[in-house]
Image (cartoon, rainbow, N blue to C red):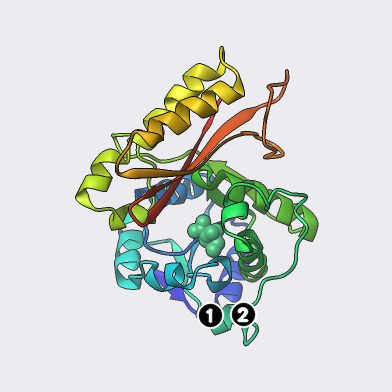
Amino acid sequence: MHVFTNRPEISNAVAKHKENGSKIGFVPTMGALHRGHASLFNFALQKCDVVVVSIFVNPTQFNNSQDLETYPRDLQADLELLENINPNLIVFAPSTTTIYGTNIESIDYNFDGLDTVMEGAFRPGHFEGVATVLKYLFEIVQPHFAFFGEKDYQQLQIVNKLVAIEKLPVEIIGCPISRHDDGLAESSRNMRLTHNHREIAPFIYSTLLKAKELFDDKGIEEIHHFVTNAFAESALLKLEYFEIANARTLEHTVAKRANESYRAFIAVFAGDVRLIDNIALN
Ligand code: PAF
């Protein structure tokens, strides 16, 4: 497996594959790879001739320095997992200086409100950091397709917007959420859960499923009450937000409209581990 750490080398390697007519897929990650990432790599490998995976813990998307410090990093374990999935994967594992030089700052973007709700409201500046690193990574890797999980559905919408704003020549592919057998969405953060929190964490998805069941017959407010009450009874899980939003604009929904798609979004603390999930409601 080829592992590149600097810009010209990865750019040249990709350019050579393009000259041979290969379709290039790209899966950006922050490492701590798990089965959820593996499903993205497999989507990319099915659609593309050559797949590049980046491993880079992006400092500008952390609004909490402790979160950045404690973010799990194990490059060796990540490389072993990638090698087992497919030794033809190309890895790009740059340093912070390679990506940002000496200016570790986000670019100012106007995402028409997509970035100020839900995750954006609770993690100010997070999406500008995500967009900034993706702009740099897309410019370096120059893929035809880039793959993102729907677990970070809001991020996926922001990436689509970024591509439109920057007119980047890449097609964004959203991939379904990968879940454990008990329903918990795969996440790098799951490995930080205590035994008791891991046992109770599938309650997040089962509550989303109930919200989806209620969506046909009940009003938005009633569903909010149902979810809030369900979490109020849990000693181990603390609800940060539950939101029903327009799937396209991510605007908070107070009443359903015909011909619109809606999604429910949730963020929950299991001890000090923050978990997010979402589900299509119609
Ligand atoms: O979803 C992630 O892991 C990160 O936000 C991303 C897209 C790799 C950007 O750092």
Q: How many marks?
A: 2
Which residue lies most toward the bottom here? 102
Q: Residue at x 77, y 52 (%)?
A: 164
Write down the residue under mark 2.
104
Mark 2: secondary structure: loop
Residue 14 percent location from the top left of the image: 58, 68
Q: Taking the image as drawn, is residue 118 in sight?
A: yes
Q: Residue at x 67, y 53 (%)?
A: 115
Write down the residue under mark 1.
96
Is residue 66 or residue 68 the one in the foreground? 66
Residue 224 percent location from the top left of the image: 53, 29
Residue 41 percent location from the top left of the image: 45, 51
Is residue 247 or residue 173 the one in the foreground? 247
Which residue lies most toward the top here? 217
22 lies above or below 154: below
Of tags 2 and 1, the one toward the viewer is 2
Q: Residues within 10 Å of mark 1 (few under 14, many from 20)?
A: some
Q: Residue at x 35, y 43 (%)?
A: 237
Q: Amino acid at mark 1?
A: Thr
Q: Amino acid at mark 2?
A: Ile
Q: Earlier in the sequence, mark 2 or mark 1?
A: 1
Q: Dividing the image into 4 quarters, which one contains the N terminus? A: bottom left
Residue 183 percent location from the top left of the image: 34, 34
Q: Which mark is residue 55?
A: none
Q: Residue at x 50, y 68 (%)?
A: 64
* Left or right, residue 84 beside residue 113: left
Q: Residues within 10 Å of mark 2 (few under 14, many from 20)?
A: some
Q: Are marks 2 and 1 in contact (CB under 8 Å)?
A: yes
Residue at mark 2 to residue at mark 1: CA–CA distance: 8 Å
259 lies above or below 36: above
